Image (cartoon, coloured by chain):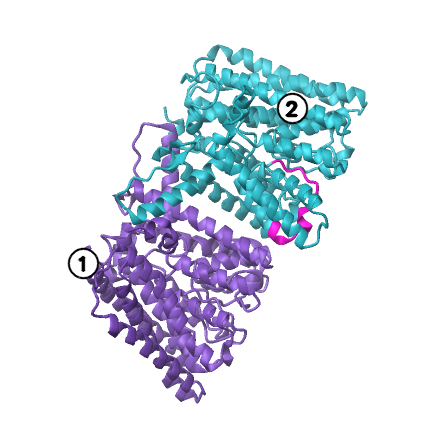
């Protein structure tokens, strides 16, 4: 393990975070919100700390290998969250360090779970930073899932090794750099289009840009206490629904579509599966809402249900309706969708459609093998047979996901939360959604969760965001052996 | 498909269970109940119809293949459950067919979920039949899991191909008969010892027999409304607790132990895993109960935790306390134990420890493979390497189990049951446990469930009992292709 090289990279990340904070300053000045000084200090601290680390350790930098990759990813997210919480702590808007770190981890992992009970009272500059943590997190995740994880071989992401744009060299640095450049262009383009559409829909520039940040990252932080419901605009609802859905799709597909190959969406098994789930769940919800009399007009039911389904499925977490007053059937379905999540290679979290699809197809293959024990039954994904090692790894991923969920829920119930709240908060964190069920529903927040519980949820967010194995591998003895 | 042979076997099963109904008559006469005629009638119908069918078709070609095996296992349970409803219906104890079928299939699958609001009101002959269904079901399961499923290759039970007692010929009939003879000896011995101990503890012969049937089959039907809490005797609690634990252990281990090799338990990976799981759950629950249930002394807390943890983890479902009122952390532990269940080759249900054990081992193997992608890492069970195909099958079983769980719970919630009751009812019925949480807690029953819900749960009991694949395979297209 080349720890010094890892530290050097972390130094660069800290510099980057410090520089990014400066973007909040114009907003702070414009709204004269009194947070200017705190943001400036936080930025200076980060820039200095980062620069010192970089200059001390940069000479150790050389070719990074798999192990360093695991360490950089996990420690990278942790360091960003530590330094990213400075503006909240220094300004005193979130006085408790635990709460500040919770909010920042929730930001960088694009979760969107908040401990703030009155968001609108926050200085605008800090709100911008809060939304920006999600946008930065989203950038990180796209590169992580399409460039880094396929090389590290985590969670079956090897399937995307050949698919993602960029050269296919086995050394980490050049490939990551190339892929990142291409995909970030797509990310930035989408963000620009969304901002313009939201401005057209009547948002002011500040709201438009913050909601863009958190939509594209499937994050879910809003600048309003009532989330997107605040704007009471069907146009905004629909625009955000469409862009959340798009952010939940593999960005490599968007890239190919932008290059002219629009049909590539329909050649992707995962996209078809994801779109079908969205459609079925939306129709189911609309029908139940009509039957229970929550809505009298079908278009209205469709508007609220499509927004909420897409928001939960893509693991964004915006709300336009308090789904906890919806019938229990819808709540339970949302709970199940929380496990499912978006597509691999998107900013969405959860188990991901690719894995669910392969698990289901493998189940069907096992049934056929039961009748014809000697037959060779391949499991196909995007018209190619999936190697058994990858299936085995995806199965292990599923088991690990469920056991992490169970174990974390057990701790939360032991801390005194009721079962529904415990399960809701853990899956909302593990899948990077934000709002859960019970005491952490869409109209509640996480401030009442016990201290230890907040740290458990923080860990869940990071473990879930980094596809479990990336984090857990660091805790094995084998990893540290030379 | 050899339907003549299938029907002849079904006829035999129905006739035999009809003969078993007669065993309740001495108790009816002794207690002076008015259910002698209905029982005689039910028994007569079953015997004439069943043995009639058997005698007519007996001469047919008796060649049975794998496919016939699947059909017999599934339709056998359904056939005896249909005829088994007769005593309830004809005596008027349970007037509705749905309820009677629910109660009978709950008996034969050794679940123990009941729709009866007042058990003590039932005539003794019918009550005896109710417990008898457990005992017959338990006999069926031992043979199914140690002789039939290994040959059919269902859900990793091939692991037990070599282990089960009896000859290892590849034809179904002789092997099944031999295994059955040996293991039923163990089963009857366990039942007999428990009856003696319960008589010693002060139960009447009737109660001792019924509760022994319910224990050794890990069923859970009691003759009392308050289940075992009625007796309020530490001796009875510990006797039944111990026998529930023993009944959840692989019966071929008991067989080897009875032949003198007592240490064989500790050479078995699954037994060790199960023991650790049960001991640590009891310790956890004892501590939490001591903290949250202020009326308990340490000894009482241990006694109640010991009994109820074993009752749930062995999939029995007896209760000495209303655990639906215990702390959320304890309830969550019980919910997880319902999903894990006992050991393979016992009368208990659910996912089973061998599978959980192997899934964990495989997960750790995958983590090691991430660091050393080229290393060959084998997964071991009882000091033998487990083939990757079996691991894949077990993992698919796990995925299928969770999927069935989620879909069934969703249907229950849609039909109007609250989320916790629905989830626990499905976990409980799929695992063949019996009681759930909330409105289906140990002191409540399933009477108030909607009609659709009862049928879904009845299907879940059978699906769980036959290890999912056995039934689902029948619904695939390739099964019916010649």
User: How far across and how far down the image is residue B178, in percent?
Assistant: 21, 64
Chain under label 1?
B
Indicate whether residue A323 is drawn in magenta.
yes
Q: Quadrant of residue B144?
A: bottom left
Residue B10 in the image: above or below residue A261:
below
Residue neighbourhood size for the residue with mark 2, other residues' Cα within 10 Å, grouped as few (<14), some (14–19), many (≥20): many
Q: Which residues are magenta?
A: A316-330
Per the image, the residue denoted by label 2 is A191
In the displayed orientation, state which residue is furthest to the front: B482
Q: Residue at x 34, y 46 (%)?
A: A368
List x then y, in percent, for residue B305: 48, 61
Q: Residues within 10 Å of mark 1 (few under 14, many from 20)?
A: few
- The residue closer to the viewer here, B109 or B7, is B7
Q: Is residue A61 magenta?
A: no
With B235 as the anchor, is B172 left or right in this view?
Answer: left
Residue underneath mark 1: B167
According to the rendering, which colour does chain A have? Answer: cyan
Residue B291 can be seen in this image? no
Task: Find numbered disc 1 in the image and state the secondary structure of the residue it sits on.
Answer: loop
Q: Indicate left or right for A314 with A481 as reference.
A: right
């Amino acid at each position: 393990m080349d720890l010094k090289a890892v530290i050097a990279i972390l130094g660069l990340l800290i510099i980057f975070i410090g520089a990014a904070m400066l973007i909040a300053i114009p907003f702070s000045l414009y709204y004269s919100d009194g947070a200017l000084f705190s943001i400036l200090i936080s930025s200076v601290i980060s820039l200095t700390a980062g620069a010192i680390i970089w200059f001390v350790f940069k000479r150790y930098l050389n070719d990074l290998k798999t192990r360093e990759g695991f360490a950089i990813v996990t420690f990278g997210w942790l360091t960003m969250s530590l330094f990213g919480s400075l503006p909240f702590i220094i300004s005193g808007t979130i006085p408790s360090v635990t709460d500040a770190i919770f909010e920042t981890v929730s930001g960088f992992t694009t979760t969107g779970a908040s401990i703030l009970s009155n968001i609108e009272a926050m200085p605008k500059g800090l709100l911008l930073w809060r939304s920006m943590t999600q946008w930065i997190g989203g950038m990180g995740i796209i590169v992580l899932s399409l460039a880094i994880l396929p090389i590290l071989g985590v969670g079956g992401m090897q399937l995307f090794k050949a698919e993602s744009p960029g050269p296919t060299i086995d050394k980490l640095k050049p490939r990551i750099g190339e892929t990142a450049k291409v995909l970030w262009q797509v990310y930035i383009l989408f963000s620009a289009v969304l901002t313009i559409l939201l401005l057209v829909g009547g948002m002011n520039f500040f709201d438009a840009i913050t909601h863009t940040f958190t939509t594209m990252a499937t994050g879910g932080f809003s600048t309003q206490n009532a989330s997107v419901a605040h704007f009471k605009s069907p146009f905004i609802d629909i625009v955000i629904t469409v862009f959340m859905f798009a952010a939940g799709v593999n960005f490599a597909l968007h890239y190919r579509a932008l290059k002219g190959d629009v049909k590539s969406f329909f050649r992707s098994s995962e996209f078809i599966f994801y779109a079908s789930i969205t459609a079925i769940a939306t129709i189911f919800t609309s029908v139940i809402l009509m039957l229970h009399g929550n809505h009298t007009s079908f278009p209205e039911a469709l508007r609220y249900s499509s927004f909420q389904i897409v928001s939960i499925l893509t693991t964004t977490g915006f709300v336009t309706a308090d789904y906890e007053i919806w019938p229990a059937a819808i709540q339970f379905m949302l709970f199940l969708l929380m496990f499912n999540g978006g597509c691999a290679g998107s900013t969405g979290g959860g188990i991901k459609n690719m894995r669910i699809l392969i698990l289901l197809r493998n189940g069907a293959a096992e049934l056929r093998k039961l009748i014809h024990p000697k037959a060779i039954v391949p499991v196909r994904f995007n018209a190619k047979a999936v190697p058994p090692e990858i299936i085995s790894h995806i199965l292990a991923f599923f088991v690990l996901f469920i056991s992490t969920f169970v174990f974390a829920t057990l701790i939360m119930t032991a801390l005194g939360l009721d079962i529904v709240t415990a399960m809701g908060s853990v899956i909302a964190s593990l899948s990077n959604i934000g709002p859960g069920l019970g005491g952490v529903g869409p109209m509640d927040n996480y401030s009442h969760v016990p201290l230890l519980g907040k740290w458990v949820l923080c860990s869940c967010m990071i473990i879930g965001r980094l596809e479990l194995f990336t984090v857990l591998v660091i805790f094995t003895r084998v990893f540290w052996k030379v | 498909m050899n339907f003549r042979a299938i029907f002849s076997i079904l006829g035999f099963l129905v006739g035999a269970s009809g003969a078993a109904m007669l065993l309740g008559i001495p108790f009816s006469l002794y207690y002076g109940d008015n259910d002698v005629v209905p029982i005689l009638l039910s028994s007569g119908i079953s015997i004439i119809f069943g043995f009639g069918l058997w005698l007519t078709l007996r001469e047919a070609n008796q060649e049975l293949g794998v496919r016939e095996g699947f059909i017999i296992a599934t339709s056998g349970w359904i056939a005896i459950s249909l005829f088994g409803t007769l005593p309830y219906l004809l005596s008027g104890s349970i007037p509705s067919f749905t309820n009677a079928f629910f109660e009978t299939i709950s008996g034969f699958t050794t679940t123990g979920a009941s729709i009866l609001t007042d058990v003590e009101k039932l005539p003794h002959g019918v009550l005896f039949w109710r417990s008898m269904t457990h005992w017959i079901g338990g006999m069926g399961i031992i043979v199914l899991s140690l002789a039939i499923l290994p040959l059919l290759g269902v859900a990793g039970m091939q692991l037990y191909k070599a282990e089960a007692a009896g000859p290892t010929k590849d034809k179904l009939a002789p092997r099944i008969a031999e295994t059955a003879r040996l293991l039923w000896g163990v089963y009857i011995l366990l039942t007999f010892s428990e009856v003696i101990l319960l008589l010693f503890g002060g139960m009447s012969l009737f109660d001792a027999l019924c509760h022994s049937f319910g224990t050794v089959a890990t069923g859970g039907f009691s003759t009392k409304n308050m289940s075992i809490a009625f007796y309020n005797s530490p001796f009875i609690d510990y006797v039944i607790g111990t026998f529930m634990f023993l009944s959840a252990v692989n019966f071929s281990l008991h067989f080897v132990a009875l032949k003198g090799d007592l240490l064989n338990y500790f050479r078995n990976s699954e037994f060790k895993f199960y023991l650790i799981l049960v001991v640590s759950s009891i310790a956890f629950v004892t501590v939490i109960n001591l903290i949250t249930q202020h009326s308990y002394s340490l000894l009482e807390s241990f006694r109640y935790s010991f009994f109820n943890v074993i009752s749930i983890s062995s999939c029995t479902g007896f209760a000495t306390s209303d655990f639906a009122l215990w702390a959320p952390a304890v309830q969550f532990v019980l919910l997880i134990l319902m999903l894990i269940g006992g050991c393979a080759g016992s009368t208990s249900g659910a996912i089973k420890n061998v599978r959980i054990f192997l899934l964990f081992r495989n997960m750790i193997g995958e983590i090691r493979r991430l660091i050393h992608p080229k290393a060959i890492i084998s997964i071991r069970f009882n000091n033998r390497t487990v083939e990757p195909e079996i691991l894949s099958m077990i993992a698919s079983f796990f995925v299928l189990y969770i999927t069935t769980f989620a879909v069934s719970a969703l249907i229950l919630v849609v039909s109007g049951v609250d989320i916790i009751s629905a989830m626990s009812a499905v976990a409980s019925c799929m695992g063949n446990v019996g009681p759930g949480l909330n409105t289906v807690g140990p002191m409540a029953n399933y009477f108030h469930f909607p009609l659709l819900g009862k049928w879904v749960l009845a299907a879940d009991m059978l699906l769980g009992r036959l290890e999912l694949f056995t039934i689902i395979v029948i619904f695939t297209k390739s099964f019916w292709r010649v």
